[in-house]
Amino acid sequence: MNDYIISTCTPADLTKEHFENQDIRYACFHYNIDDKTYDDDLGLTMTMSEFYKAMADGAMTSTTQLNQTEYAEYFEKLLSTGKDVLHISLSSGLSGSFNSARNAAEAVREKYPTQKLYVVDSLGASSGMGLIADTLADMRKSGKTIDEAYEWIEENKLRMHHWFFTTDLTYFVRSGRVSKISGLFGGILGICPLLNCDVEGKLIPRQKIRGKAKVLEATVEKMAEHADDGTNYSQKCYISHSASFEDAETLKKMVESRFPHLKEKVLINEIGPTIGSHSGPGTVALFFWGDKRTD
């Protein structure tokens, strides 16, 4: 039986229309601008341009993950449909969300003993997590059972590559990913750090690259190095960005030129408030299926 629910949360950074078209359910995280709390509801309450403008104007932002009680209520709502559920969680290396979801699932299963509720640590974020959910939705369409989909993603989630770069170090310094001294000299020298998610789902700086053009080239090279079948890659590829559409569009054109066998055109998404509160504007990320991450 393949009539089951694929679920994730809004830091998967897909659009509302995409979630609906692929029949993927989602739970909304929360974020704060100065002292006011909002739902990360895919831009319904506040558009991405309004959010990043507030950051650029000096607003202090932070995020609040779903707690165990909220996850329990969300899972109960899904299970009350009578369907089994496969939920993809934000990386445990970036947030405590996975632990909250896992603990909630343990409690909720007691009320629904005949149904399946799987919670997967994506070990990723943003549209990388979104591409995982999208791939599982495609597997469901092809007839895969929930057990087959769950076993497959647990075996393959480390093959989802996340490569990020930023042209504005301000928020990486604020989050502690870049030291204040490195941020100062990096800004003066035009350094654009290239980062990716490691095997624990943590965001790790990999290279310090001078200039936007070079970091764009380096990002495409990482895809050529790691993607399934190299430049013959024939699966989906996603890009997400925070108030950096022109850079995202440039990267899209470079990828589509270098990888002519893509399953579809590269999809560009906006980085939502949950991830964007920490990355800030100026970040672009590339996601694709490739070899298994080893470090």
Image (cartoon, rainbow, N blue to C red):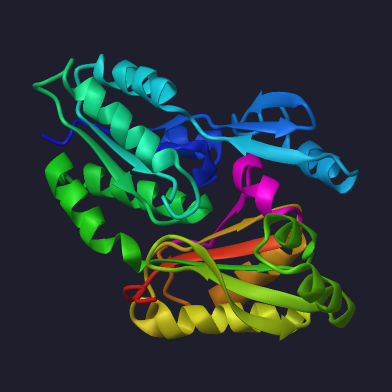
Picture quadrant of residue 57 = top right
* Front-lying residue, 278 or 146: 278
Q: What is the x, y in percent for residue 217?
A: 64, 83
* 276 lies above or below 110: below
Q: Is residue 191 left or right of residue 259?
A: right
- Whether residue 249 appears in this view of the structure is no
- Whether residue 279 is in magenta: the answer is yes
* 290 lies above or below 201: below
* Front-lying residue, 168 or 2: 168
* 240 lies above or below 119: below
Q: What is the x, y in percent for residue 150?
A: 20, 47
The N terminus lies in quadrant? top left
Magenta residues (range): 264-281
Residue drawn at (68%, 39%), measured in percent from left and top?
62
The C terminus lies in quadrant? bottom left
Q: Is residue 168 left or right of residue 205?
A: right
Q: What is the x, y in percent for residue 115?
A: 14, 25
Residue drawn at (79%, 64%), measured in percent from left and top?
168
- Whether residue 284 is in magenta: the answer is no
Residue drawn at (63%, 37%), measured in percent from left and top?
63
Residue drawn at (23%, 29%), measured in percent from left and top?
106
Number of numbered markers: 0
- Whether residue 183 appears in this view of the structure is yes
* 286 lies above or below 194: above
